[in-house]
């Protein structure tokens, strides 16, 4: 049942004709109203043109709300700042999936269910052997997550609520294991199995860093930092990868295929690869003395140099996730005793300059979550090739929740964007001997 309310009407008239249409203006709980254009073509014979869908609502959703101008991010109505301070990632997963904060009993049941699904089918180990050792971990993630449908094909009926729930549990639980194994595979190290006595974040860190030869103890500070990274990246409304998951889901594809599609979309440097791009940018700058020249290149309209990790497509204010991540960043650096890491010193100096330079202030180019998460992960010894993988681990719950919402929405149809055709008009085939 839709929760949209009619807030009025919008009348569109095609100038110079007597053709007009009155369309409903629909309002949600928060945010601007939307013109319902579903009958626009039927009544006026025209489409809307919105490359990138920046002004188009493709669905109704109750999961995440963003106010980019005010710097607000809500999960199911709860401010991200409160969840980051008072909750943990597994509780946030429950909230995103079911819409409400759990009772103690519900959370314990959910946490137990996730914990006991973290093992993957043993035959899946062999699947990794088909990849080159130097394969990018995101390539491995795309392949292995998509392959889960071949190993867990007993619960692929998307019309059965219980089977959807089991698939969701499996994805939340198994994606960290797959991610950690992709990392271990690239290093040539043995796979580390999940441990049921550790928290979600601690278990992930243990699988990433432990080796059979000696005991690895997870630092509480790093565990908290990883948990924050997961919470802050869990969902972010209708971004590119989430839209991809929904589009794939609209075809009736199984959830493992849909999440694999989301991982593929996330791989792009303009999306999930942004924190990896931050470290590459810092490496290219090389030394704090080179920052002024770099800043001048960024300001040069004729230059293609970009300041990665600053500004956001949606936020026209300080990214609320970045404020939280900044505090965590400094706590991690202190815990690890990082005082003379050139790349991190460079990042802090770049942050200071950008926050005081009128050029960036006037354009609201504040550091975003990718800037700080990249620094944290670098300090934790995680290679840049794994940054987007960790993003995928976090975003899996958002994708699942969005996919589940899509399947349960009776108004959703298979995604089919329109286009404005600018190619040649109709023409007749010319035999090859007559072509000049």
Image: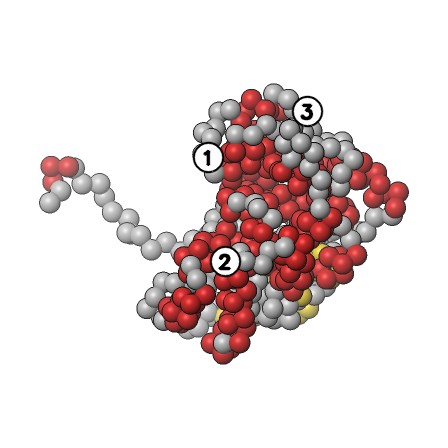
* 276 in relation to 191, above or below: below
Nearer the observer, 331 or 81: 331
Q: Residue 431 in the image: state x and y as whole percent.
A: 16, 37
Whether residue 405 sits left or right of residue 377 in the image: it is: right
Which residue is labeled 3 in the image? 154
| Viewer-side residue, 256 vs 37 | 256
Residue 52 spot, x, y in % from top left: 48, 57
Residue 285 numbered tag: none
Q: Of callouts 1 and 2, which one flags the residue occurring earlier in the amino acid sequence?
A: 1
Disc 3 to disc 2, how far (Cα)? 51 Å
Residue nearer the viewer, 313 or 174:
174
Which residue is found at the position 60% from the left and 55% from the top? 338
Q: Are marks 1 and 2 in contact (CB under 8 Å)?
A: no
Earlier residue among tags 3 and 1: 1
Crowd around label 2: few <14 · some 14–19 · many ≥20 (10 Å): some
At label 1, counting other C-alpha atoms closer than 10 Å, the crowd grade (few under 14, some 14-19, many 20 or more) is few
Which residue in the structure is indicated by mark 2? 342
């Amino acid at each position: 049942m839709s929760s949209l309310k009619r807030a009025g009407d919008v009348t569109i008239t095609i100038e110079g004709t007597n053709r007009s249409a009155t369309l409903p203006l629909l309002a949600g709980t928060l945010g601007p109203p939307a013109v319902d254009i579903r009958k626009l073509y039927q009544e006026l014979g025209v489409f809307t043109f919105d490359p990138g869908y920046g002004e188009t609502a493709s669905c109704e959703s109750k999961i995440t709300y963003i106010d980019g101008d005010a710097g607000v991010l809500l999960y199911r109505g709860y401010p991200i700042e409160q969840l980051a301070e008072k909750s943990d990632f597994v509780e946030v997963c429950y909230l995103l999936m079911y819409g409400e904060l759990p009772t103690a009993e519900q959370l314990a049941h959910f946490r137990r269910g996730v914990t006991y699904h973290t093992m993957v089918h043993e035959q899946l180990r062999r699947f990794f052997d088909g990849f080159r050792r130097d394969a990018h971990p995101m390539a491995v993630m795309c392949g292995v997550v998509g392959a889960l449908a071949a190993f867990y094909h007993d619960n692929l009926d998307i019309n059965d609520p219980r089977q959807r729930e089991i698939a969701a549990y499996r994805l939340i639980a198994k994606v960290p294991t797959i991610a950690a194994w992709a990392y271990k595979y690239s290093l040539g190290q043995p796979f580390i199995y999940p441990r049921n006595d550790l928290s979600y974040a601690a278990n992930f860190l243990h699988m990433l860093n432990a080796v059979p030869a000696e005991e690895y103890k997870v630092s509480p500070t790093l565990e908290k930092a990883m948990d924050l990274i997961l919470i802050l990246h869990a969902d972010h409304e209708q971004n590119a990868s989430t839209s991809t998951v929904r589009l794939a889901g609209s075809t009736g594809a199984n959830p493992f295929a849909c999440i694999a599609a989301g991982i593929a979309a996330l791989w792009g440097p303009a999306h999930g690869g942004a924190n990896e791009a931050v470290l590459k940018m810092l490496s290219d700058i090389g030394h704090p003395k080179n920052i002024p020249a770099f800043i001048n290149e960024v300001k040069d309209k004729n230059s293609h140099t970009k300041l990665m990790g600053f500004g956001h497509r949606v936020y026209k204010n300080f990214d609320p996730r970045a404020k939280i991540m900044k505090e965590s960043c400094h706590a991690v650096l202190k815990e690890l005793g990082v005082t003379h890491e050139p790349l991190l010193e460079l990042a802090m100096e770049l942050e200071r300059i950008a926050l005081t330079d009128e050029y960036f202030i006037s354009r609201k180019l504040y550091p975003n979550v990718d800037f700080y998460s990249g620094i944290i992960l670098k300090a934790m010894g995680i290679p840049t090739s794994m940054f987007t993988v960790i993003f995928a681990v976090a975003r899996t719950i958002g994708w699942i929740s969005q996919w589940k919402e899509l399947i349960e929405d009776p108004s959703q149809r298979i995604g089919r964007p329109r286009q404005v055709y600018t190619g040649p008009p109709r023409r007749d085939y010319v035999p090859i001997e007559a072509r000049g």
